[in-house]
Amino acid sequence: MRASAIALVVGGRLEGGTDPDLTGAAPLDHAAPTDLTLLSSPRYAPDAEGTAAGAILVSEELSARVRAGLPRIVVSDVHGALALLLPHLYPPQTTQAGLHPTAVLEPGVSIGDSVSIGAHAVVGAGTRIGDRAVIGHHAVIGSLCRIDADAYLHPHVTLYAGVAVGERSILHAGVRAGVDGFGYSHQDGRHVKVPQVGRCTIGADVEIGANTCIDRGSIGSTIIGAGCKIDNLVHIAHNVRLGEHCIVIAQVGIAGSTRAGRYVTFGGQAGINGHITIGDGATIAAQAGVFGDVEAGETVSGYPARPHREALKAQAGLFRLPALMKRLRTLEHALLGKDRTEP
């Protein structure tokens, strides 16, 4: 694409005098003359001086830091512009509709128009698959599932019985949804399994990363709200309910029956105790350990998690302890004498 065509796609303006032909995108330090690169943070401004890129996508506030002679496409939001542009430079692969000869469909499966079902996939009895949905190679879909239109299940996804997947949702390789929750009753000195008979419902426009596990409800439902984006290696336990458009980063664990509102962000490796409520727009910082309810809009961090400013003060106080202990020993030495020994 010409740089001028890219500027048109992203709603930016082309500056710098030339209009190069560009065939891809690359980081500042790896870009070739046929690549578009980007600058969105002052931290990387020095790298822009030596880039070999043919043009640079840059924010308004940083455009003046681009060296003269390098064509620049100036936008208000670099990453938003990149999201618009990349499908043009790298068109998504299309999947051919059809049923692979090795796929297994049990009785009563309903398939919409232009569905693709890959090699060695298994679809359980009574499952309904909507128009243009894609079921990848070796995927296993249990009985009575519902996969809505344009959903995309990558290879080796496993859905237990009764799981629902909303329109346009994407499940990456190794996702396990509808798994039995961790429910046991201690009786006569042993752990007795409590049957997990609830459902697992995944809303529309959800994306779930590789090897993430989502339990079914014990007797109710585990619900992933529309628009949620879940990273790799996340565990969501039984009866959890995530509101719309939550973000869950890698290695988060959310214990059973937690309720999260809309637009909640869970930082990487955060651990969430069960049976708590997290309000709309709250942020759980990375590696936080959350043991109680979190108010709407609040940011919490630390272990145990507390309001972020409070956690920072506590951490700063902890870092000062060695110096305070040294001062205390000096004072004791001065007050009690050199020959005083500790009991």
Image: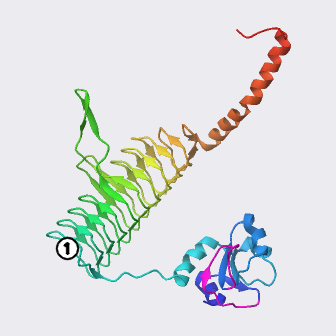
Badge 1 is on which residue? 110
Query: Residue 265 location, x and y as percent?
Result: 51, 54
Query: Residue 44 location, x and y as percent?
Result: 73, 67
Side of 309 where 218 appears, left or right = left
Disc 1 packing (10 Å; few <14; some 14–19; many ≥20): some
Side of 131 where 74 appears, left or right = right
Residue drawn at point x = 75 percent, y = 70 percent: 47
Give SS at disc 1: strand
Residue drawn at point x = 58 percent, y = 84 percent: 9
Whether residue 73 is visible to the viewer of this picture, yes or no, is no
The colour mode here is: rainbow
- Front position in the image: 268 or 31: 31
Answer above or below: position of 201 versus 297.
Answer: below
- Front position in the image: 110 or 245: 110
Residue 112, by quadrant, is bottom left
Residue drawn at point x = 65 percent, y = 81 percent: 36
- Residue stretch in magenta: 17-33
Question: Which amino acid is tagged 1?
Answer: Ser
Q: Residue furthest left?
A: 107
Query: Residue 286 location, x and y as percent?
Result: 56, 49
Quarter of the image with the C terminus in it: top right
Quarter of the image with the N terminus in it: bottom right
Magenta stretch prevailing secondary structure:
loop
